[in-house]
Amino acid sequence: MRPWPAGSGSGRSSLGHSPAHGAFAAPIRDPIDDRPPRWEATRRIASAASADCQRENVLNARIAPLASSPLANRDAPWRLAFVLIPRFSLITLGCATEAFRLANERHESPPFACRMLGVTPGEVRTNAGLRLATDGCIAEAEVAWDLIFLISSLDSVEFDSPALSSWLRRAARAGTSIAALGAATVLAARLGLLDDHRCVTHFRLYARFLERFPRVRLERGLYCVDRRRITCAGGLAALDLGLHLISDVVEPQVAHEVAEIAMTSRIRSGAESQRMSVRWRYGVSDR
């Protein structure tokens, strides 16, 4: 079995930190562009399924994602927990939290109550080596959360914690919505939280994810909402997901104002491609 990809093609993070585990020692190969022959049949099946679901994905992006969850139709602030997995991505965390912070600024009574939690007490190290203080840890947080975000990175894709696993399973049984961002989709799938749910993940994880978790309905796209499970490719896509949720559970105008303040030209739908267009990726032009 091939190892999960790490943070860069050299087997080291972008700031030169060595991966923590041997599973990340191998260089990254893009699973879409560099896939063994045995993946060809799987790729064709997945592509056909993706094409069949494309129209459904576009429609799903317009549907209130949490209509059946505690996040819909209530006056009290929605309680959001952001769980920081060691060596998490600052880009993903910033994009995931900033949309809700800006939405709170637009209201006299903030619609979201956000807290950052660690798996264990104390600061949490990012994949860049920085340390971030949290509001507490999961063992101390006995709050009935409305939505739990899992913040990870390609550098921590194989992170495992019995305490976190038990905490997430209890939350899922209690009906809490869970949002796995980026590589955290691997953790959620490993716990069975995504079984029989539609899901997206970072494109570098796609081939191995498809092989390892056959019960998950893996799709391509930026983010996906299926009942009480939300998944996102991570990075800047977390901002699009946040704007989408704000549009549905607060109002579209607030999402538009937040997008403008964050200087994003539009709110991308969940069905859009993760990959850069051919024009920009290869410098192709008509001239």
Image (cartoon, rainbow, N blue to C red):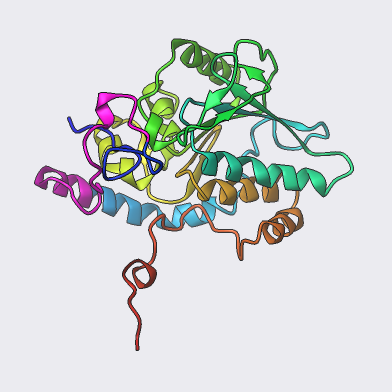
- Report the front residue among 25 and 70: 25
Looking at the rendered structure, the number of numbered marks drawn on it comes to 0
Q: Is residue 178 above or below residue 139?
A: below
Q: Is residue 46 left or right of residue 58?
A: left
- Residue at 82 percent across and 49 percent down: it is 106
Q: Which residues are magenta?
A: 17-44
Q: x, y percentage for residue 185?
A: 42, 33
Name of the residue lying farthest toward the bottom: 287
Rendering coords of residue 101 (x, y %): 73, 42
Residue 272 in the image, given as x and y percentages of width and height: 46, 58
* Left or right: 72 in relation to 220: right
Provide residue 122's location: percent of width, then percent of height. 60, 16
Q: Quadrant of residue 22?
A: top left
Q: Which of these two is toward me, 115 or 213?
A: 115
Q: Is residue 170 above or below residue 152?
A: above
Residue lying furthest front: 16
Question: In the image, is 88 to the left or to the right of 143?
Answer: left
Is residue 196 visible in this depiction of the protein?
no
